Amino acid sequence: DAGDKNNFRHYMEKEIFEQPIAIKNTLLNRIKHGKVDLSELVEEHATVLAHVEHIQIVACGTAYHAGLVARYWFESITGIPCDVEIASEFRYRNPATRPNSLFITLSQSGETADTLAALRLAKTIGYISTLAICNVAASTLVREADLVLLTKAGTEVGVASTKAFTTQLTVLLLLVAKFSQIKNKPALVEKQIVEALQILPNRIEQLLSSADKIEKLAKHFADKQHTLFLGRGDEFPIALEGALKLKETSYIHAEAYAAGELKHGPLALVDKNMSVIVIAANNHLLDKLKSNIEEVRARGGQLYIFTSEDSDLADADSKNMHVIALPKIEELTASIYYTVPMQLLAYYVALIKGTDVDRPRNLAKSVTVE
Ligand code: G6P
């Protein structure tokens, strides 16, 4: 029940802890006999999927970050070129449409003014079809898009979006599997996506059961003025999302960088007063990330490294370097998984700071005017 916080102190906390069930609900009836089934897409439009040669994703805020993650997936897994843009930019720059391009909008509410305007524009400039991934079935966006995939997060009340984001990523990964079928990728690709998605709710459940680990860390941030978030690959957008959560809920200035950009500017900010959060999933980029970690360490920065207990960073805890070793996760869903500790951290820091967690100052749940 959306109107009830149950035993939780805030909606944000409740919604973070609801993510395993929200993801389960989002997967329900969309995987059959080990294969992704999106037959809910209306047939006359669904046939266009076979002709898609490019994907344009447009969204605002947290939903935009989901789009950024999906770009890594679409290009590396399906080979379909993908661009992602903020709706308020897309709508005013007279964008050029690629041939056979599918326009995808992501939105929790389906009422964000810029996102709606971008969809309406897209419908006039030659996209092969438009698809809305949205959490509200009765929304304007859902009504106006050709194709719809609903996230089944349930009502999200907290202004800082949590379960809407992870369920958007869930739907996007289902869509990636669908396109891997369409583009005749090896069956193993889809199998691995399906398996990773099916186990994901349990993995998040397990992570949430040790939320107190992250709660203990929060006090390190409560008196901070600035925090830097770093990630690489599909964890870079999670760094962006982590920084957004922290600034929204705690009013701490937070910035995210692709870790490889450290030398191009942000390193100048690093001294013993700078906290640096690193999302270090155990993948082929881990060694690159280790060099970035060393760059921060050499300048005395306070490191907080979120990694997997099976990564060789797991035992690297030392002075000025806090390692938060999390249960292992499939590589395909690591970005979804690592979102959760970022949300928890933002929530617990906000609790200490005593901010209005569910309704941060100056922000609205749904931005229906420009
Ligand atoms: C507001 C909310 C964010 C949300 C963004 C986009 O800024 O506070 O949480 O990500 O709007 O909203 P939408 O409903 O389109 O996802």
Image: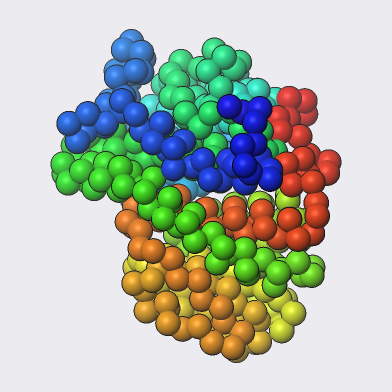
Q: Nearer the viewer, residue 285 or 329?
A: 329
For the image, the number of numbered tags is 0
Q: Residue furthest right?
A: 362
In which quadrant of the rendered view does residue 211 lie? bottom right
Q: Residue at x 80, y 51 (%)?
A: 355
Q: Position of residue 340 (x, y in %)?
A: 52, 53
Q: Nearer the viewer, residue 175 or 151?
A: 151
Q: Residue furthest top?
A: 44
Q: Nearer the viewer, residue 183 or 35?
A: 35
In the depicted structure, whether residue 201 falls above or below residue 35: below
72 left or right, relative to 361: left
Q: Is residue 169 visible?
A: no
In the depicted structure, whether residue 330 falls above or below residue 267: above
Is the C terminus in the top left, top right, bottom left or bottom right quadrant?
Answer: top right
In the depicted structure, whether residue 23 falls above or below residue 132: below
Q: Position of residue 212 (x, y in %)?
A: 57, 63
79 left or right, relative to 267: left
Q: Position of residue 111 (x, y in %)?
A: 65, 23
292 left or right, relative to 359: left
In the depicted structure, whether residue 209 falls above or below residue 289: above
Q: Residue at x 74, y 47 (%)?
A: 357
Is the N terminus in the top left, top right, bottom left or bottom right quadrant?
Answer: top right
Q: Residue at x 50, y 68 (%)?
A: 306
Q: Residue at x 19, y 36 (%)?
A: 34
* Colour mode of the rendering: rainbow
In which quadrant of the rendered view does residue 276 lie? bottom right
In which quadrant of the rendered view does residue 257 lie? bottom right
260 left or right, relative to 308: right
Q: Is residue 269 visible?
A: yes
Q: Position of residue 253 (x, y in %)?
A: 76, 61
